[in-house]
Amino acid sequence: MAEDITRQQIKDINSAVAYSIACDESKDKGDIEQIALFCRYVNSAGPQEEIIELIPLKGQTRGEDICEAVLNCLRAKGINTTHLVSVATDGAPSMTGAQKGFVALLQKSLDRKLLTFHCILHQEALCAQTFPPECTEVMNVVIQIVNKIMAKGLNHRQFRSLLDELESTYSDLQPHNKVRWLSRGEVLKRFAACLEEVKTFLGSKGLTFPDLEQPEWLEKLHFMVDMTAHLNTLNTALQGKGRTALHMLEEVLAFERKLTVLARDLQKGTLSHFPNLREFKEAHMINSEYLHSAIIAMQTSFGKRFCEFREEKPHYPSLSLP
């Protein structure tokens, strides 16, 4: 059955007028680099997205190694490269190097120009990391505290019992995972909601974190909770099967405009789009100017990225989502 599905998949790709590939490089738990090779094409059923192969690179991971592995995979499966028109990557130097990068070598091997893109989701994730160092440090402290509570089974059980006893909003904290989508926002959201319980538990264990009593630190915590919620909404909108480059770019451009609204909201002090920060402001002063500059910096980062997609936007077909 698997062989039949693979044959049908290859037949559909080869019969398509055009198709594109996407390559993402990642390391598995055995320290072996894996190239995830995806293909996108259109058939009678509409836009299709399929994984072609997970290609292990046991030696070096230079652009030439990736190019050779990808071309060998396509040839071995009998996929015709004549109709390959576009390639998307994760933007790593080995992928996008001007002379020896995977994309440059692939175009040289095929002897023609391809449309090349840096993955929208990857670029969005990079933009989301443009918080000021002080805000990033807030995240580091939160992760440190969460690990203190969850690393030992006894501590974790006692903390959950405390949350249950106090009828907290959540029954547990969320561990941080750099790989899993949306993890950072959920970690901060739960931590802020259980802040008093966390302080009580740490006190019972003789652990002190002075940051938890500092208004400046707490201000940045609540700001991060609200901003990561907005970023998670964007990230979720960018995911899902059948998303076209046009629709994903429109989501990004809409978020850029939304950042203008958020910055103006902070300047005016209304905080309509910052519910956690608004609640914190009821008892504390906030540094609106500093937080405003953080949003402007993120907006600038969004404005500098997605160049390839912006350039090609006039040529995108206006497709509706399936």
Image: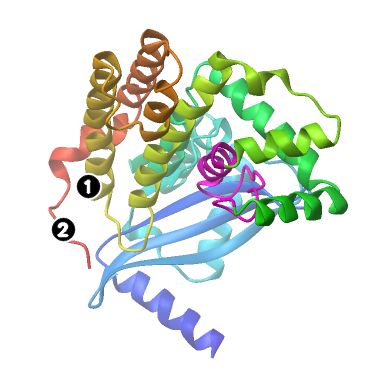
Give the mark count: 2
- Which amino acid is tagged 2? Leu
Mark 1, Cα crowd under 10 Å, few <14 / some 14-19 / many 20+, is many
Q: Residue furthest front?
A: 166
Q: Residue at x 54, y 14 (%)?
A: 216
Is 61 colored magenta in this rendering?
no
Q: Circle 1 — which element?
A: helix
Q: Residue at x 37, y 60 (%)?
A: 240
CB atoms of marks 2 and 1 within 8 Å = yes
| Residue 264 horizontal/vertical position (percent) | 23, 19
**Is residue 262 shown left or right of residue 88?**
left
| Image coordinates for residue 234, horizontal then vertical, percent | 35, 43
Report the side of 317 relative to 268 (left or right): left
Q: How far, Cα to Cα, is label 2 from label 1?
A: 8 Å
- Tag 2 residue: 319
Q: Quadrant of residue 206?
A: top right
Q: Nearer the viewer, residue 262 or 252?
A: 262
Q: Which amino acid, mark 1?
A: Leu
Viewer-closest of 300 and 195: 195
Residue 246 picture location, percent across and down? 22, 47
At numbered mark 2, what does the secondary structure look like: helix, strand or loop?
A: loop
| Quadrant of the rendered image containing residue 56 | bottom right
- First in sequence: mark 2 or mark 1? 1
Q: Which mark is residue 246?
A: 1
From where the camera sits, is residue 30 visible?
Answer: no
Q: Position of residue 192 (x, y in %)?
A: 55, 36
Q: Which residues are magenta?
A: 168-193
The residue lying at 22 percent from left, 68 percent from top is 322
Residue 191 among those drawn in magenta: yes
Observer-nearest of 39 and 168? 168
